[in-house]
Amino acid sequence: MTKKSIAVLCSGGDGPGMNAAIRSVVRSAYFEGIDVYGVYKGFEGLLDKSVAHLDLSSVGNIIQRGGTIIYTSRSSRFMQAEYRTQAAEFLKDLGVSGLIVIGGNGSFNGAALLHKEHGIPVACLPGTIDNDIEGTEFSIGFDTALNTAVEAIDKIRDTATSHDRTFLVEVMGRSSGLIAITVAIATGAEAVIFPDLKVDLASVAYTVKRGVTRGKKSSIIIVAEGEKEGLSHVYQKELQEAYGLETKLCILGHIQRGGNPSPRDRFLGSFMGNMAVKALVQGEKAVATVVRDGKFAIAPLNECLSKRNDFDRSLLDLLNVLAL
Ligand code: F6P
């Protein structure tokens, strides 16, 4: 009898903690007597037939490393049905009985289609620094990205204070403002701008100037990245021209996607990797590992396919109070 096997891939933007998840998938599968194929570069690897057998030692010494040892990609080919058919045929030829996908919202949708159109059992782990997947309170990579951003902004605060300056600091997250609002509160920022909400630069300028008047030596304005690139430059110009507020701009960018995962992201990856393997072993067909009400759970994949772009708006009130 041939040994049962599954495949694992990472897809979309990487996030710290993905390696912990891969390690957990491989070791948990081994424990169940199942072989694991690592698929390189996400769904692209299924189309290019780029896979390797991952044995126990291939995932040794990676739990603490950022990035993903099997790489990732945003596959536009996989968005087309003909390529998904090709990918499914490859998985069937490989003899795998399930696919584990670690990624964000787009990756979850790709996996859901692979299951719907070709019956491949899929188990998905939320892996994105944006933490914007519907149905789960946390995704792998979010916590580390917060830590990275906060550490960077604390440093910016030092130099801002020495020079009596105001900084605009842009953080990642696309249309999700979760990184922005969380780091704004955690760094004691004076204000936060969300391009996808109503932008009130008059009020931002007022808050900063009020602080300066009462003796603040530095001010930080967090800018959520939003869907459209380059908006921070627009805000910087407008704050200067319309409100006479001079600022320095720092775009944190991809630095937030790298680095050693935090203990929390290592734990999330480790726990969820194990859950995903067990779910496939138990015969689940299309599921996601999630955190709900603070507890780990297995959810139907179709509950996790949309983007979660909202956050608790009362956090803005909190920020305003704390920025007085
Ligand atoms: O989805 C994660 C993310 O880091 C977003 O916050 C960001 O907008 C995007 O990916 C950047 O993607 P890329 O690395 O493909 O430019």
Image: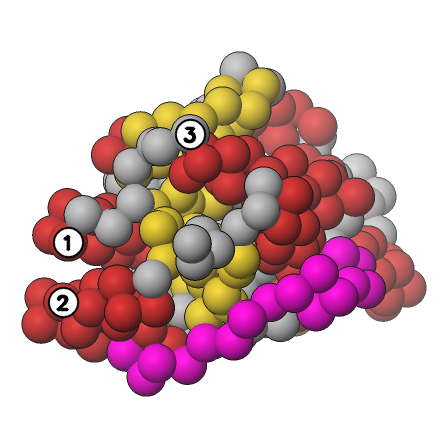
Cα distance between the residues tagged 3 and 2: 25 Å
Report the disc number at residue 118. 1
> Label 3 is placed on what type of residue?
Gln
Q: 187 or 160: nearer the eye?
A: 187
Q: Compared with residue 144, is residue 203 higher up or lower down, i.e. above or below?
A: above
- Left/right placement of residue 4 relative to residue 55 reads left
Which corner quadrant of the image does residue 228 belong to? bottom left
| Label whose residue precedes the other's in the sequence (3 or 2) | 2
* Residue that badge 2 annotates: 85
Q: Could you say where residue 284 lies in the image, as x and y percent from the top left? A: 34, 32
Q: Secondary structure at mark 3?
A: loop
Q: Which image quarter: residue 155?
A: bottom right
Q: Nearer the viewer, mark 3 or mark 2?
A: 3
Q: CA distance from mark 2 to mark 1?
A: 7 Å
Mark 3 vs mark 1: give the one in front: 3
The C terminus lies in quadrant: top right
Q: Is residue 49 left or right of residue 7?
A: left
Residue 131 image position (x, y, % from top left): 49, 43
Estimate the spatial distance between the alpha carbons at disc 3 and disc 1, rounded to whole Å: 20 Å
Secondary structure under badge 2?
A: helix
Classified by dominant secondary structure, the portion drawn in magenta counts as loop
Number of labels in the image equals 3
Classify 10 Å Cα crowding around label 3: few (below 14), some (14-19), many (20 and above): few
Residue at mark 3? 282
The amino acid sitting under disc 1 is His
Q: Is residue 109 magenta?
A: no
Dot 1, crowdedness within 10 Å: few (<14), some or many (≥20)? some
Disc 2 vs disc 1: Cβ atoms closer than 8 Å?
A: yes
Quadrant occupied by the N terminus: bottom left
- Secondary element under disc 1, as helix, strand or loop, is helix
Q: Which residues are magenta?
A: 47-68
